[in-house]
């Protein structure tokens, strides 16, 4: 898709980079380049693809690390500014609230300037506000800096989806989404692991200083990142060759009214009119809300129940990191096995879109079970390893569900509908992730940990039906959608044609 999010278009022949005409017109689609165009990111050498993808992961890692970093220094923030724990947790929540604007704004920035400039401007401004947070002399200043750090860092977490879709084939959507999700999950999980010992000896400000160092390192690594957005590649090439170029209208809109419709009014309309979008949005909202409350509840529970030090709490997050790594492995293997059994090792032409939901079906069982597991085993009578492993199972389940559901939405709707759906899903889940950490400690105190997590467990049990229903009836629901119905009849032909072109192209390159 144009702008920040991915969408897999049928291939369209475009003019070669050596064209000599004065005007090059691409009237059919938003950005698709010819499958034989050497400037097409999917035709790049593998080393260049990996570099562009790794840079996107490094930037996302830095922002995710910064988002959760302050949770390690909550006690220090409470003492330094004489605020309650709920107020101190705002350091996490305000950052997430800032990030929540990214899905709405980033598509329009990416459409106008390409991906690389947004990456290279977003991360330094994020770093400046992180520096300001570390030097804050009042809680108000800390809160403002953390919010704007999230606001300006958020595009790095959104653009990565578009970058991966630019350079990797559609038949590996679940695989590449699992890898781009890994950057955010591991980045968030590494903050308590890395900072636990440092904060104990240096103070809470070092949560921000270490984040600054990581952001600086990521920026140096990525300063040469190539542009991957096909529309911007075409525009840049035309300018370089002195040609005029007329591209089809951007799916994200051109005027302010069109942009507002695509990322504001249309997502709200889909939230109440599209059953698929409604179900996925609610499930991911629960998923992310519980995911981010672990950064508040795990330190509190381990300290009170098992007398863990801050350093030991950090080590407990190794389970979460391992869970994310295993999810990447299992989602990738599931897609590979599913494609092979369908006879689609190099194409998804005959593979129904609903097969992308398989990791979510398994993950939904783990998500529900892990919540009861943790709630009923976090007790002095039971070894601390048991609930810690439970958090790893939750993270595996969470990431598997996210990878499968978002990968499904990628191609469930036409370009504009996909952009609106992904905007809604991302914004809602981030807002919920920001809200629950503020109330989780009072909830555990009032209900007890056992019943607090049982509440989430029962909610997750109800949500287990979502991937199953979509797997069984998703195609029928899409055919009845006002957004997707008209593309259903030609979906198989389009996908077959696209991947046949890709197969011929790859065969000629290796001949």
Image (cartoon, helix red, strand yellow):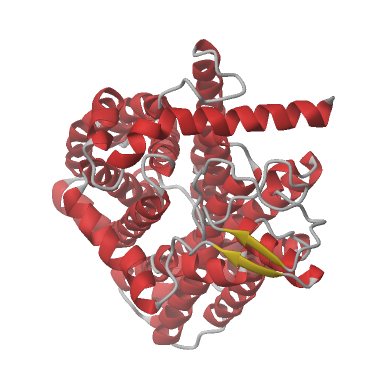
- The x and y percentages for residue 145 are 48, 80
Residue at the spot 22% in from the left edge and 53% down from the top edge: 271
Q: Is residue 80 in view from this perspective?
A: no
Give above or below for 235 relative to 480.
below
Q: State how many labels appear.
A: 0
Q: Is residue 48 left or right of residue 249?
A: right
Residue closest to the far right: 511
Rendered image quadrant of residue 377: top left
Nearer the observer, 162 or 27: 27
- The x and y percentages for residue 243 are 74, 70
Give above or below for 163 relative to 142.
above
Residue closest to the far front: 21
- The x and y percentages for residue 221 are 77, 60
Q: Is residue 16 left or right of residue 214?
A: right
Residue at the spot 29% in from the left edge and 50% down from the top edge: 285
Give above or below for 20 relative to 305.
below
Q: Is residue 449 left or right of residue 348?
A: left
Give above or below for 412 relative to 132.
above
Q: Is residue 459 in view from this perspective?
A: yes
């Amino acid at each position: 898709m144009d702008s920040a999010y991915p969408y897999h278009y049928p291939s369209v022949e475009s003019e070669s980079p050596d064209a000599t005409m004065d005007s090059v017109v691409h009237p059919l689609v938003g950005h698709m380049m010819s499958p034989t165009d050497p400037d097409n990111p999917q035709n790049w050498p593998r080393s260049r693809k990996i570099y562009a993808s790794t840079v996107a992961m490094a930037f996302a890692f830095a922002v995710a690390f910064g988002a959760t970093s302050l949770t390690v220094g909550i006690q220090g923030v409470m003492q330094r500014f004489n605020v309650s724990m709920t107020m101190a947790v705002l350091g996490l929540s305000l950052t997430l609230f800032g990030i929540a604007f990214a899905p709405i704004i980033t598509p329009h920035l990416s459409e106008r300037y390409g991906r690389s400039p947004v990456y290279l401007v977003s991360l330094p401004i994020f770093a400046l506000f992180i520096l300001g947070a570390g030097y804050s002399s009042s809680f108000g200043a800390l809160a403002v800096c953390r919010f704007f750090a999230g606001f300006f860092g958020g595009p790095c977490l959104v653009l990565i989806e578009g970058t991966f879709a630019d350079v990797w084939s559609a038949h590996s959507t679940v695989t590449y989404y699992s890898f781009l999700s890994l950057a955010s999950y591991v980045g968030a999980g590494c903050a308590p692991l890395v900072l636990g010992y440092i904060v104990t000896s240096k103070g809470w400000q070092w949560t921000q200083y270490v984040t600054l160092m990581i952001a600086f390192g990521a920026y140096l690594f990525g300063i040469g990142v190539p542009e991957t957005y096909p529309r911007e590649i075409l525009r840049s090439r035309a300018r370089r060759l002195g040609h005029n170029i007329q591209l089809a209208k951007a799916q994200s809109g051109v005027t302010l009214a069109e942009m507002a419709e695509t990322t504001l009014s249309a997502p709200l309309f889909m939230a109440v009119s599209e059953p698929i979008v409604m179900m996925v949005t609610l499930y991911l909202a629960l998923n992310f809300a519980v995911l981010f409350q672990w950064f508040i509840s795990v330190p509190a529970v381990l300290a009170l129940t098992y007398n863990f030090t801050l350093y030991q709490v950090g080590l407990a997050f190794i389970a979460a990191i391992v869970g994310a790594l295993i999810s990447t492995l299992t989602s990738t293997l599931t897609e590979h096995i599913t494609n092979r059994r369908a006879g689609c090792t190099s194409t998804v032409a005959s593979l129904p879109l609903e097969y992308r939901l398989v990791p979510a079906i398994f993950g939904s069982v783990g998500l529900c079970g892990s919540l009861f597991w943790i709630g009923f085993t976090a007790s002095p009578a039971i070894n601390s390893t048991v609930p810690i492993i439970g958090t790893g199972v939750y993270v595996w389940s969470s990431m598997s569900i996210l990878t499968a559901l978002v990968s499904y939405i990628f191609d469930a709707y036409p370009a504009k509908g996909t952009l609106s759906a992904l905007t809604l899903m991302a914004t809602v889940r981030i807002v919920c992730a920001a809200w629950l950490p503020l109330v989780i400690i009072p909830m555990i105190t009032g209900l007890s940990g056992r019943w607090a997590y049982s509440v989430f467990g029962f909610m997750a049990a109800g949500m287990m039906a979502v991937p199953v229903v979509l797997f069984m009836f998703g195609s029928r629901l899409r055919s009845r959608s006002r957004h997707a119905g008209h593309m259903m009849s030609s979906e198989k032909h389009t996908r077959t044609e696209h991947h046949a072109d890709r197969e011929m192209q790859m065969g000629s390159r290796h001949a």
